[in-house]
Amino acid sequence: MERNGEPGDVEELAPREAARTRHRDRKRIVRMVVDNAGVKRILLARAARRTATRDGERKATER
């Protein structure tokens, strides 16, 4: 029997098998596919946020 993640598939299984399938699906990590441009955009945003935080801390300590 092929499972494709539809709700009706679990109902056809034995209770023990259905529980095992639900547990396995909950443990799965959702992975995002990001291209190189997306990675670069994320890194630049993090660097900008880090720099802004440091500048804010410096201004607060100068007062």
Image (spheres, helix red, strand yellow):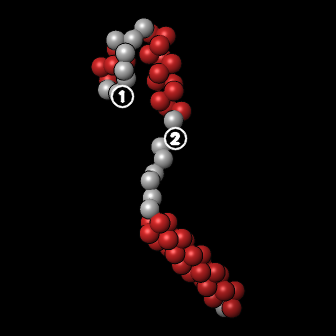
Pointer 2 residue: 29
Q: Quadrant of the N terminus?
A: top left
Give the Cα separation between the discs numbered 2 and 1. 15 Å
Q: Residues within 10 Å of mark 2 (few under 14, many from 20)?
A: few
Q: Amino acid at mark 2?
A: Ile
Left or right position of 53 against 8: right
Pointer 1 residue: 5
Which residue occupies the extreme right position in the image? 61
Mark sitting earlier along the chain (2/1): 1
> SS for tag 2?
loop
Residue name at image x 33 percent, y 19 percent: 9
The residue lying toward the viewer, choosing from 39 and 55, is 39
The residue lying toward the viewer, choosing from 41 and 62, is 41
Counting from the top left corner in percent of width and height, residue 4 is at: 35, 27
Residue name at image x 47 percent, y 43 percent: 30
Residue name at image x 46 percent, y 24 percent: 22
Q: Is residue 8 above or below residue 15?
A: below
Counting from the top left corner in percent of width and height, residue 6 is at: 32, 26
Q: Amino acid at mark 1?
A: Gly
How many numbered circles does the render carry? 2
The residue lying toward the viewer, choosing from 4 and 18, is 4
Q: Is residue 54 above or below residue 1?
A: below
Q: Quadrant of residue 48?
A: bottom right
Task: Please tell me the numbered disc located at residue 58.
Answer: none
Residue 1 can be seen in this image? yes
Which residue occupies the extreme bottom position in the image? 62
Left or right position of 9 against 21: left
Residue name at image x 66 percent, y 91 percent: 63
> SS for tag 1?
loop
Residue 49 can be seen in this image? no
Counting from the top left corner in percent of width and height, residue 39 is at: 49, 66
